[in-house]
Amino acid sequence: MAAAALCPCQAVLARRGGALRALCGSVRGLAAGTQTHFGFQSVTEEERREKINQVFESVAKKYDVMNDSMTLGIHRVWKDILVHKMNPCPGTLLLDVAGGTGDIAFRFINYIRSARERQLQRKLRQHQNLSWQEISESYQEEQFKPLGDSQVVVCDINKEMLKVGKQKAQYLGYSEGLSWVLGNAEELPFDDDKFDVYTIAFGIRNVTRMDLALQEAYRVLKPGGRFLCLEFSHVSNPIISRLYDLYSFQVIPVLGEVIAGDWKSYQYLVESIRRFPPQEELKAMIEDAGFFKVDYQNLNSGIVAIHSGFKL
Amino acid sequence: MLRGGGRGAAAVLRRAAAGGRAASGGHGQQPDPEQGHGQGSARPQPLEPSLLSFLVCPLSKRPLRYEEATNELINEELGIAYPIIDGIPNMIPEAARMIRKKPPAEDSKQA
C-alpha cells in the first residue's frame, strides 16, 4: 500500500495547489463517493469523517464526565480489565490508537510502574549480600528508570481530544514515557514492526474504513505483537438486550443534553453501537487482517467485548 | 536530566537526518531541542526526541527530518512538511504543507 501511494504521489505533486488533498482522496480509494453509515443515517465516507470529527470536537471537554455518567463509572473497570489482560512488563512499547484523553495510556503507565517496583524489590532481595565492588558498580549505573524503557504513544485523529488528554497528563503528573501524535488510524505515521502492543479502546467504531485500520495495526506491530480492541458489542441475552436498548435510547441522549449540552452526539453514539458488527464478525475482520489466535471476551454479557489477536 | 535528554536527542536527530536526506554530514544538522526547552514560552514547544525515532510520513512511510526553524517534520522526497502544534505533531496528510516550490498556498488543517 505504501508503494502504491508513492507513485501517484509523485505524479500528482508535479501539479500545483491542493494536490496533496487530491492525493489523499485517491489513496483512500475513491472513498468520497462510497456510501456508509453515520449512526442510522446513510452518508458518504467523506461526510462521515467530517461528522465524526465534529462529534468529538464538541464532546472533547466533557468526554470523561460523560463516560462516567453514561456507564455509571463501569468504563473504568472495563479499561482496567483491558490493561490487566495486556499484562505488560517493563520495556513494552504500546501504541494506543484513538486514545484521545489518555485513559488506557495512564493505566498502562501505572501498571508498568508497579510491575517495575516489584521487579526492583525482587532484585534488591536477591542482592542482599553484595561485595563492595558490586555496590560501587551499582552506584555508577544509569539513573533509576522508573518505567524501565516502556513507552506509550497516544495517537488520535482529533486535536481537541489530544489537548484534553495532554492537560490531564500534566494534571495527573504523567510525563515520562508518554507521547502524543495527531494521526489517522487508517494511515498510521509509524514504521513497520515497531510496537509490542496496539490498543484501540472505544475507537474502532468511529473509524470509517475498519479494514484499513486493522491492516495498519498489523503493519506497525512487531512479530509476536498483540492487538487488543475494547469496544461496545452485541448482547445476545434478550432480557438484558431490551433493558440495554431502553437505557441507551432513552437515558443516554438525555444525559448528553443535560451534561454536555449535546443531544445529537450522544444519539450518534448509541446508534453507532447498534451499527457496529457483532463479536464474531469483528473476529473475522481481525483474522482477515492477518492476525492469529483471534479471540474475544465478553464483559457484562456482551455490552462490551475485548478482542485480541497476535501477529505471528 | 535535560542535558542527558539533549544528548540522546542529538543522536536521534542525526539518525533521522541521515535517513531523511542524502548524507551531507550529520554534524551540520544538529538542531538543539535543549534550547527549545530553555526558552519555553517564547518558542513553540519542540518535539519529544524519543517520538522522532518512531514517526514516519504516513503517506510514504519514510523517515522524517525535524526542522527546528519552522518546528515541522519534513519529508524531503515528497516535499511536504507536517506541523507540530503544542508539541503534538500533526501527521494528517491533509494538514501538511508542500515546501517544494513556494510558501504554503493553503494551510488548512482538518482535525
Image: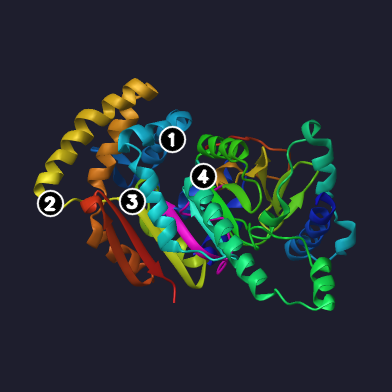
Q: What is the three-letter code of the residue carrying label 4?
A: Gly
- Badge 1 marks a residue whose secondary structure is helix
Alpha carbon separation for disc pair 1 and 4: 10 Å
Q: Which residues are magenta?
A: A182-202
Q: Residue at image x 18%, y 40%?
A: A244
Are discs 3 and 4 less than 8 Å apart at CB? no
Residue A227 place in picture, x, y as percent: 42, 63
Alpha carbon separation for disc pair 2 and 4: 32 Å
Dot 3 or dot 4, earlier in sequence:
4
Which residue is identified by label 2? A237
Give me the chain letter of mark 1: A
Which residue is identified by label 1? A64
Which residue is identified by label 3? A231
- Please tell me if label 1 and label 4 are on a single chain: yes
- Please tell me if label 1 and label 2 are on a single chain: yes
Label 3 neighbourhood size at 10 Å, few (<14), some (14-19), many (20+)? many
Dot 2 or dot 4, earlier in sequence:
4
Label 2 neighbourhood size at 10 Å, few (<14), some (14-19), many (20+)? few
Dot 1 or dot 4, earlier in sequence:
1
Q: What is the three-letter code of the residue carrying label 1?
A: Asp
Residue A51 colored in magenta in the image: no
- Please tell me if label 3 and label 4 are on a single chain: yes
Dot 1 or dot 2, earlier in sequence:
1
Are discs 2 and 3 less than 8 Å apart at CB? no
Give me the chain letter of mark 3: A
A75 relative to B5 in the view: left or right: left
Q: Residue furthest front?
A: A129
Residue A184 colored in magenta in the image: yes
A281 relative to B17 in the view: left or right: left
A15 relative to B7 in the view: left or right: left
Dot 1 or dot 3, earlier in sequence:
1
